[in-house]
Amino acid sequence: MHLLSVILMVTALLCTANVQAYRFLGILHTGARSHHIVGSSLFKELARRGHQVTVISPFPLKKPLENYVDIETPRIKAVMESSAAFLLQISERSVIENVRNFHEMGLNMSRTFLEEDNVKALLASNQTFDAVICEIFLSEALYGLSEHYNVPLIGLGTFGAHPWNTDMVGSPSPPSYVASAMLPFNDRMTLWQRVGNFAYNIFERLLLDLYYLPKQAAIYKEFFPHNKRDMYEVRRNAALVLLNQHVSLSFPRPYVHNQIEVGGMHINRKRSPLPVDLERFINESKHGVIYFSMGSNLRSKFLPLEKRKAILETFRGLKQRILWKFEDPQLEGKPDNVYISEWFPQDDILAHPNVKIFITHGGLLSTTESIYHGKPFIGIPIFGDQFLNMNRAEAGGYGISVDYTNFTKEKFKVAIERMLNDDSYAKRLAAISAIYRDQPINPLDLAAYWVEYVVRHKGAKHLHCAGQDLSFIQYHSIDSMLILFGGLALAILLTMLLIRLIWGWLQFALARKDIKEKTH
């Protein structure tokens, strides 16, 4: 036994010697809790692995975690709270106005973040890090933190591939079959959808290159005047981009080696016990439970009165019990079969076997969790990628979309009854869930591995795509085509000129010969 103890101790010491702890700076700059849920799951895992993690965000941990240090940004949270009431009005505005406001919000968030007192104090300190992990969401100026500390930049995309993150590593996005995340198209578009997708890509490219990115670059230069590399160079030299996406939840598309899908890394693989009253409410429902949440950013309490009444009247006529994430404890006209709360442990609720369907806004986190737990869903998309997610669900046969603008009790009730009475939705989702779950490694472990890999290999420069170093003309082979086709055209032109000259000479020679014969 003594010998066995010695062997175990030596083995433990050797393993410890091979484990190297790194220092990570995490940046979760938005006031959107859903974004924070994704990022914090990675940072908590890194802390559990023994790394020192410092996280700048509006949402400090409620329970302290060893190796995890919070730097709070209260101003960002206040900005998000003040705009929450207006999010439901997005559908009433034009696409151009929404896109412009969206990017203006990003510029405002970036500046507000860098003006936070706690961020200034960190930058003025002598702290050092091994890598900066920054959420990619209208945050380009914040990439300056990686250059400030002279460490690799790791991007964390809280939803799927988009020019914001594909530009950072060089993943191609052919518009012929890769639809914009802002459009409700799939990978097999009609001719007119391809035209629309191509037009939107041009519009977005011009918006980014001529308007939005120069403004982010100005903020970068203002707050990081001593950085050696400018924002554009830092942005196109990211060491790694992690995407909160998976091919089973979207469509196949090309990625370079340092853009990795880790969708669903925030999901609890083991259900935690629910609060006693909530567990009882779900268990005692003979006909099952419907869970309804519009996410962390959209607030049900801000729904227009007529839409709220339509929802309540629909719920009143159902034999199922309802869990509704409603942010006001006073809900006038609430039926007895409805349980309201400003917050629910969504992951654990969706894992409960007595929960039958999920009514959602169609956000990526909600739809991913629903797919993982095998619950078909009804979506009421409002903005952003919610339309794309619901279009994907409808095409896959495991979701139903309800139009928010023309929302009525009748349409809502028909969608609910259709999903409850047609078991094809649950069967199809079970198949998709099986595909999603069939992964060789847990997405959270995969994300942590690649983060450690980048630091272990000093920024993993061998993964850098050479296309990132080419200009637009070089990347699209415009110069090569000009030389190739220009040279070919020149050769054809010279050949034609030569033929014309020879033909002219022959005509001249024949005419001269004819004259000589006539004179003799």
Image: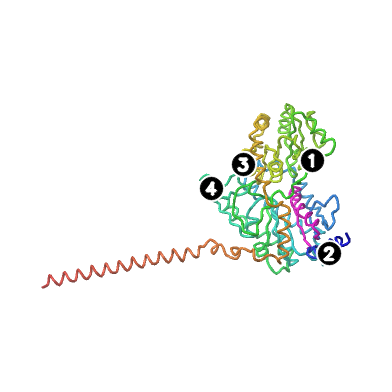
Specify the label residue 194 is tagged with: 4
Residue 455 in picture, x, y percent from top left? 73, 64
Residue 65 in picture, x, y percent from top left? 84, 54
Q: CA distance from mark 4 to mark 1?
A: 40 Å
Task: Indicate the amino acid at tag 1.
Answer: Phe
38 in magenta: yes
**Nearest to N terminus: mark 4 or mark 3:** 4
Comparing 205 with 14, the one in front is 14
Dot in front, 1 or 2: 2
Dot in front, 2 or 3: 2
Q: Quick one: quadrant of the N terminus?
A: bottom right
Label 4: how many residues lie within 10 Å, few (<14), some (14-19) or many (20+)? some
Q: CA distance from mark 3 to mark 1?
A: 26 Å
Q: Is residue 277 left or right of residue 461?
A: right
**Residue highlighted by disc 1:** 344
Label 3: how many residues lie within 10 Å, few (<14), some (14-19) or many (20+)? many
Task: Indicate the amino acid at tag 3.
Answer: Asn
- Look at 66% across and 39% down and name the residue there: 429
Label 1: how many residues lie within 10 Å, few (<14), some (14-19) or many (20+)? some
For the magenta stretch, what is the residue range?
Answer: 22-51
**Nearest to N terminus: mark 2 or mark 3:** 2
Q: CA distance from mark 2 to mark 3?
A: 56 Å
Most extreme residue toward the right is 2
Helix or strand or loop: what does disc 4 sit on?
A: helix
**Residue highlighted by disc 3:** 391
**Residue highlighted by disc 2:** 10
**Nearest to N terminus: mark 3 or mark 1:** 1
Residue 288 in picture, x, y percent from top left? 74, 31
